[in-house]
Image (cartoon, helix red, strand yellow):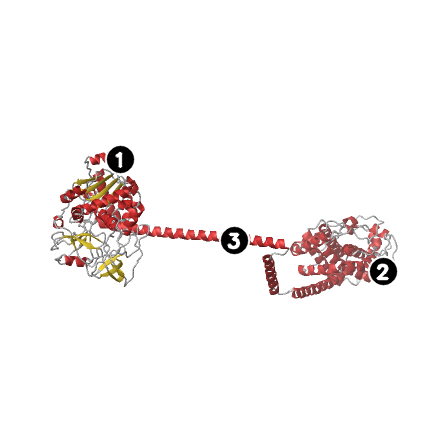
Amino acid sequence: MQHLLERIKAGTLWDFHGGIHPPENKHQSSLTPVVDAGLPPQLIIPVRQHAGPAGELLVRVGDRVKKGQPLTRHDKGRIVPVHASTSGTITAIEQHTVAHPSGLDDLCVILTPDGEDAWCERQAQPDYWNLERGELLERIQQAGVAGLGGAVFPTHSKLDGRGQLTEILIVNGLECEPYITTDDRLMQEYADEIMDGIRVLKHLLKPKLTLIGVEDNKPAAIDALTRHATDPDVLVKSVPTKYPSGGAKQTIELLTGRQVPKGGRAVDMGIMVLNVATVFAIKRAIIDGEPLISRIVTLTGDAFKQPGNAWVRLGTPVRWLLQRFELQPEADQRVIMGGPMMGFTLPHAMVPVVKATNCLLSPTRAELPPPGPEQACIRCSACADACPANLLPQELYWYSRVKEYDKAEKLNLFDCIECGACAWVCPSEIPLVQYYKIAKDDIREVRAEAEKAERAKQRFEAKQARFERDKAAREARHAEAAAQRRQAMAAAGGDDPVAAALARLKAKQEAASAETLPDNAAMMAAREARKQEALARRAAKAVETAESDDAGTAVVAETDPKKAAIAAALARAKAKKAAQAAGDEITSDSPAAPNEPLAEPAAEADPKKTAIAAAIARAKTKKAAQAAGDEVTADSPTAPSEPMAEPAAEIDPKKAAIAAAIARAKAKKAAQAAGDEVVSDASVSSSEAASEPVAEPAAEIDPKKAAIAAAIARAKAKKAAQTAGDEITSDSPAAPSKPVAEPTPEVDPKKAAIAAAIARAKAKKAAQTAGDEVVSDASVSSSDAASEPVAEPAPEVDPKKAAIAAAIARAKAKKLAADAAANTSSPSTDKSH
């Protein structure tokens, strides 16, 4: 930096890329001194005249104000106030067209002057060096000072940032725009006050060097400044005239040779650039205590009868100024605010003068012809050669036109200073700067919306976090209070009232829910009773049917020996299957010793296994019936060639289940009654049983087919009994040639057959329920039966053993039936001998 300072002091100058040399047209207004424009009948003061948000209004309609009184409140940040340009009354606060290229309306304060032009109380500070840095910045903000070179950036904000690190202070007096001479006349007439303002800034920023840049087309201004620039660290630098040398970045490069990086700021390089009119406004604000309420405006163009420069109060309508300086309008007269390069045409003349207004140009059509129609770009690159920011204007134009703003931003769209040099040299007369302005505004709007959404999100998240903190703190307080309450209750020996209340509430809720539920116990009990009654009726009916079937079967067995043998074989097969399902609990009784009593029951069966076996047999009955027909006939060893009678109608499995349920209930009683009858029947043919071997049981039968076999046998026996009933009585005595182990008293054959049939029926029902099988009992030899006393009664049976006893009785009864059938055939056997 020191080397750079030495080169600058030595008079070294640099240059910037591009630039143009348009006609200057400055002599029209630069030759006459600055005049006072006067006081208009009405002032239109926009509340926002700077680059930043507007301040809060401090006045209302009807208030009387004095000159220099603030109309809006200044606040932290980039908010600067506006002031009353004269004394008078606030007649309206409304929307009005403002000085902006868009021509939109903004909030304005309408002030009607009272003609007195009375000042409010001012706070002048000639000894500014006694003020602190913060107080100086505060006064600059209160005075409403903003950049008067055109950007109107709040000056206090610009000086506050890294201003204390400034090494070079540059006062920009280049004023390169054609027609404009406000800074030229200001430097010529107020050079001393400009130097006072520089001294205030030197006290505030403490730079190492101060440079005042002026174009060489302003010799009078250079002379005036040189006379008053007596400080050794203040240099007046004359630079060659070239547009746009007045741009901040171009001025820095001209005077220091340093370039501001893309996206960077000059203040970050230790360089501060301020417009000469801004320096003058700082002097007025600090030393004189006057806010920014007026500025010099150039009124020029061939349409003016008296072009020149004038002190104009902010808020003065343009129409009044045009009349005041004798505008001679043409048809469709244009009024341009600013210069021909960077200015814009006003939508109408009732637009107020603001802080950024430095020129009102009213050219004739011959003087400044309007631009022609836009034509297609011919890619001549003249715009790129003229661009002082070293950009690619043609590329930016294409992307801005199709609204591909992301690509335009990559080409450094925001580095464009909107100087208009590219449009000036464009042979196709494309308004390039207008495209760039629209693109920038669109991008700023999108960013503003995104920032607004982000701020809203942050506020919401902060609110949620605050709610969570409050909730956690509240719960912690409640928990602590509850703990203290429980401790206090425990110390006092009582119960926690909260816990007690909760318990009462819970009990009350349970009681209410219990009351709402209906009591169906009585209804359920009545329904169950009806079901049991129905089951009992069906079971009784099934028992009666079974008894009648068994009685007929017994008669047939005593009449036809072959059919009786078949029925016995079927019974033995069914008994064997039942024995296997019951776990072979009764097979030990089959090889009983000769001295064992015949009626002694087998080992006690497991009730659970018995019930399970019976249930399984009933469930598989229907399926087994379809495949059991052929195997029943094959099981008969006595008459394999005899055709078997047609089976009866298939028994309903549901009725069989009901009958089994009833039989279980009657097991004990049936077993006791059947015991005596079976013994008396057995004595009739004990001698024949001793001499004839009992047929061996058939091959093992599938358990699924046993139940159907018994039913088919019963049906066939019943049919045979109907045809052979008369022969039973004649054949009943036993043959004399058969040895009898022990004589037995004579028994009526008919009664014995009936009793045996009844016993078999009852025993069969009990056996189906209990699931006990007595296959081995069917093979007991006749000698065992003969050695035992026939008339000995059966012992008392335990209720649990009733089913087993009934099964044994059934087997014995079937055996007796076989013996009776053998007795009927004994006379023919004697005759053959």
Element on which disc 1 rests: loop
Q: Residue at x 83, y 48 (%)?
A: 593
On the question of residue 431 being in view, the answer is yes
Q: Tag 3: residue type? A: Glu
89 left or right, relative to 751: left
- Check whether the beta carbons of the residues at disc 2 and disc 1 lie within 8 A of each other: no
Residue 747, which numbered label?
A: 2
Relative to residue 452, is residue 255 depicted above or below?
Answer: above
| Percent position of residue 376, x then y | 19, 48
Q: Residue at x 85, y 49 (%)?
A: 595
Q: Nearer the viewer, mark 3 or mark 2?
A: 3
Element on which disc 2 rests: loop
Q: Tell me if mark 1 has few (under 14), some (14-19) or many (20+) residues whose alpha carbon lies within 10 angstroms of its own.
A: few
| Percent position of residue 760, x then y | 77, 58
Residue nearest the observer in this picture, 646 or 317:
317
The span from disc 2 to disc 1 (Cα, nearest Å) is: 150 Å
Instruction: Work out whether mark 1 precedes mark 3 in sequence or the reverse, and give the earlier one.
Output: 1
The residue labelled by disc 1 is: 1
Q: In terms of image quadrants, where is residue 533?
A: bottom right
Q: Tag 2: residue type? A: Val
Relative to residue 660, is residue 77 depicted above or below?
Answer: above
Q: Nearer the viewer, mark 2 or mark 1?
A: 1
Q: In terms of image quadrants, where is residue 565?
A: bottom right
Quarter of the figure with the N terminus: top left
The span from disc 3 to disc 2 (Cα, nearest Å) is: 100 Å
Instruction: Work out whether mark 2 precedes mark 1 in sequence or the reverse, and give the earlier one.
Output: 1
- Check whether the beta carbons of the residues at disc 3 and disc 2 lie within 8 A of each other: no
The residue labelled by disc 3 is: 475
